[in-house]
Amino acid sequence: MLDFPTTLSAVVKPAPALSREEREREIERAGYNPFKIDARTVSVDFLSDSGTGALSTAQRAAAEQADESYACSSSWYRFEESVRDLVPYRHVFPVHQGRAAERVLFSSLLSPGQISISNTHFDTTRANVEIAGGRALDLPCPASSDLDSEFPFKGDIDLGALERTLSGPEGSKVGIVLMTITNNGLGGQPVSLANMTSAAEIARRHGVPFWLDAARFAENAWLITRREPGYSHWDPRDVARREFALADGCMISLKKDGLGHAGGLLAMRDDALAERCKALVIAGEGFVTYGGISGRDLEVVAQGLREVTDPQHLAGRESAAALLAELSHQAGVSTVRPSGMHAIYLNAGRLLTHLTPAEFPGHALACELYRRGGIRAAELGSLYLGELDDDLRLREPAPFELIRLAIPRRSYDETHLRFVGSVLDDIAKEPEQVPGYRLTEAPPLLRHFDCRLTPLPN
Ligand SMILES: *Cc1c(COP(=O)(O)O)cnc(C)c1O
């Protein structure tokens, strides 16, 4: 007998279902860029799991009791209490989203020329290290570069490389060791508690603060209970507390495991650092008890942080990702292994072998998913990460041609996932029908958000 799923839909919205001709017109208008496609034409939106989930009835009820007082509102106290149930740090600052926490932290902690070491910096995290004058150094574990390896903790940091860097000639320049859980830049792979414990110990021995970028702390905790020896009987909430207890502080985008539509937080043990952060929060975000978000949003994420460690919620996330991966394999499309929780990553390079990296196979597959099924997803390949020459031709390809199908929380059910599987099946029957693309316009910075492309004749 199956477990009963334990949630029922309380509010529903219609999903657009356009004709293929209507979508062809829309994607052409959008310059073949998923970020410019009108969401009213998207049937299944897998562009991001950030701020895109459905609220629970308890979150909507909490929002009704919001207190919009400027300072020390009752919503702030409820937010603080909910955060403190997870993190053991003295200082807690709400901010408007995760990247605001990054800006405040790195401006307060790093001096120009200092190095931030991570298992992998998320893209905004890297940008904020660099804006603060620092250098971002990624030390992912070796297993992470093999997309097919079933190693259970491919999000781990390379402990040997961490020790060597900290003991080496540049060791004195390292200002922070930052562990991203789960490792979003590397396929959403989890980090083991054993790896976090050792990394924290190495950092501490060298006198360097150890922090967490914990946007998906609950999904990471769940995968620890599923994959790490010794934790299978643990409550994921206790694993999450253990994660935070290892660190000197954390940044959390509350648009992921906060189950919110806005918000982030910054929390830490160090009093002097907190004083410096406080000034930047007030100057850039808002007074320290609201940090740029409304009382309503404080209530929503306070309740979200209570709900997110529910084993039923986390088990449902894991099985949704596993089902989507299984459906992809059945269609003949390989995915980055093992599948994580927030997204699956399709290996477009392996499917569209008739396209060279310069024809952007990941992007080609993303466009095809929209044309055939109204499914929106983002490329993670040479369009996003490759190097271009002045004529917008690819000079240096990315190591892999992937696309990410990010699964919004509590929004799609098995029927939607099976529909996506059937569209993939349709594409994979005749992959050579999928055209490549050429860039026609690209801004110098963050080009994937604003570029335009055109399909190549097949
Ligand atoms: C989303 C994310 C961020 C940035 O958070 P925003 O709320 O989008 O600003 C930082 N780090 C990681 C790992 C993330 O996934």
Image (spheres, rainbow, N blue to C red):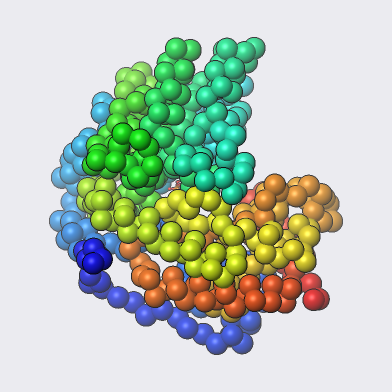
In front here: 450 or 323?
Answer: 323
* Relative height, residue 127 to residue 382 (above, below): above
Residue 145 visible to the viewer = yes
Q: Position of residue 197 (x, y in %)?
A: 39, 25
Horizontal side of 422 relative to 24 (left or right) equals left
Q: Position of residue 342 (x, y in %)?
A: 43, 54
In front here: 429 or 420?
Answer: 429
* Relative height, residue 34 to residue 96 (above, below): below
Horizontal side of 52 relative to 387 (left or right) equals left
Residue at x 22% of width, y 58% of height: 59
Q: Position of residue 308 (x, y in %)?
A: 28, 50
Among the 4 quarters of the image, the one containing residue 431: bottom right
Horizontal side of 4 relative to 329 (left or right) equals left
Q: Quadrant of the N terminus?
A: bottom left
Among the 4 quarters of the image, the one containing residue 273: top left
Q: Position of residue 458 (x, y in %)?
A: 80, 76
Residue at x 47% of width, y 76% of height: 419
Number of labelled discs?
A: 0
Residue at x 36% of width, y 26% of height: 247
Residue at x 30% of width, y 75% of height: 12
